[in-house]
Amino acid sequence: MIMAPIVPSPLAPAWLAVPDDPNALGAALWPDTARRDADGEISLGGVPVSTLAERFGTPLYVVDAATVRTQAHALHSAFADAFAPLGQEPTLYYAGKAFLCAQMVRWVRELGLSLDVASGGELALALAAGMPAGQIGLHGNNKSEQELTLALEAGVGTVIVDSDDEIRMLAELARAHGVRQRVRLRVTTGVHASTHDYLATATEDQKFGIALADAPATVARIRAQSSLEFVGMHSHIGSQIFAQEGFAEAIRRLMGVQAVLLQDGPAPELDLGGGFGISYTTADRPRPLAEIAQGIVRALRESADEHGIPVPKVSFEPGRQIIGRAGTTLYRTGVIKDVTVHGEGGQPSGVRRYVAVDGGMSDNPRPELYGADYHAVLASRASGAAPGLVRVVGKHCESGDIVVDADYLPEDVRRDDLLLVAATGAYCHTLSSNYNLLPRRAVVAVEDGRAWTI
């Protein structure tokens, strides 16, 4: 729609390109069913955004059921194909911390996935929504006696133990309940994924797991407990990972320890966690899942051959890969103002347009927590106006209340327009709050022209 090239704003980050058409919906960012109609309005799952706003209000989280399914199937196919030459099909646990509700649990069951939970609350929800306990893995660095008791009484398939203290407590509780509980040991490999420091979870200096060098002695203490069954190690190197090199290095280190563990007993399983990245902006280029899966299999096979041991049964815990792109957030615009930004010497260096919306950091704190970038489009109409640099901000009493730090929207964006922010399915609703006493927002699912609250 925009014919002449537009000069980038001097305030735009280097990675942000001026779009040829600010109305475009790139397939890598948006749900499978996102469409613009003849008037330029976006629909999701066959439901126009104006209908969603009228029925449910804004801000509004919208989950496209079709995309949840296609992402889960794509994951399954990529890993099943990659692991077929090894004669195994890895187990996929959906990471409930990304987004969880009863409907999501039902989708997980329908899709044949297992479920990873990280608290007693998530476990209780999963059980209440009908998830078979044997297909649940329970995480957490500080599980309470109450949480472990709930897991034991429900028959949770695997508890991922995180410390000697937890091992002792779980062993005593399992003995008292007359059960032998399967456990994995979470280890830190020292591999730092290329991500934000707070998202990297395999460095030694952090709260999760035990150092890889301490694993043999810790496993010996697990095996000494008749009420516990050690089934393997668990490793998670971080989140929003775009390449397989970090996984390959972690596997190399893990398999060296695996060879040691096998000298004293079985260690049939290995969980490699999740963290597979998705596109949040038009500049993001995550590696295709099939490539990552093949790289992981190659590393497993090479390491197993080097140590003369079999490849263990592998599992993964994807979350955002399944729900991230399926979710969007719908906002209504309010105040719009231009701010002249001055550079060195007090000279104007550019004008930044602030577009305020009716939500903000209470419905997505990730920009404040991690410096996360997002992408927004004008959703209630298309526009022939040139793209202009904007910063989409919330209505909270915080200067850091930023929804989209930098993006290009049509220059005629105005009050009461609807904006749609891409890829908000993961870690937005689950991290949301009532800051400034704004209510937590509804989540609706859309499919085949229907919309319902989940």
Image (spheres, rainbow, N blue to C red):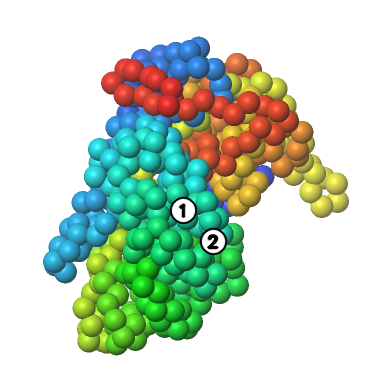
Q: Quadrant of residue 129?
A: top left
Query: Looking at the image, can residue 213 be seen?
Result: yes
Residue in the foreground of this view, choosing between 452 and 23: 452
Q: How far apart in space, not on screen, are marks 1 and 2 (Cα)? A: 16 Å
Earlier-in-chain disc, 1 versus 2: 2
Residue in the foreground of this view, choosing between 54 and 108: 108
Give the number of marks. Answer: 2
Confirm or deny contact between disc 1 and disc 2 (CB under 8 A). no
The residue that appears at 30% across and 61% down in the rendered structure is 315
Which marked residue is nearer to the observer: mark 1 or mark 2?
Answer: 1
Q: x, y (%) of residue 154?
A: 37, 48
The residue that appears at 25% across and 38% down in the rendered structure is 110
Amino acid of disc 1:
Thr
Q: x, y (%) of residue 152?
A: 40, 54
Amino acid of disc 2:
Asn
Query: Looking at the image, can residue 215 be seen?
Result: no
What is the secondary structure assignment of the residue under circle 1? helix
Residue in the foreground of this view, choosing between 158 and 175: 175
Q: Quadrant of residue 180?
A: bottom left
Quadrant the N terminus occupies: top left
For this orientation, the residue located farthest to the right is 345
Q: x, y (%) of residue 332?
A: 58, 21
Relative to residue 280, is residue 454 depicted above or below?
above
Quadrant the C terminus occupies: top left
- Residue 141 bears which disc, if any? 2
The residue that appears at 49% across and 47% down in the rendered structure is 120
Specify few, some or many for label 2: CA neighbours under 10 Å numbering under 14, 14-19, or 20 or more: some
The residue that appears at 61% across and 42% down in the rendered structure is 365
What is the secondary structure assignment of the residue under circle 2? loop
- For mark 1, what is the residue? 149
Q: x, y (%) of residue 74?
A: 25, 47
Relative to residue 219, is residue 240 depicted above or below?
above
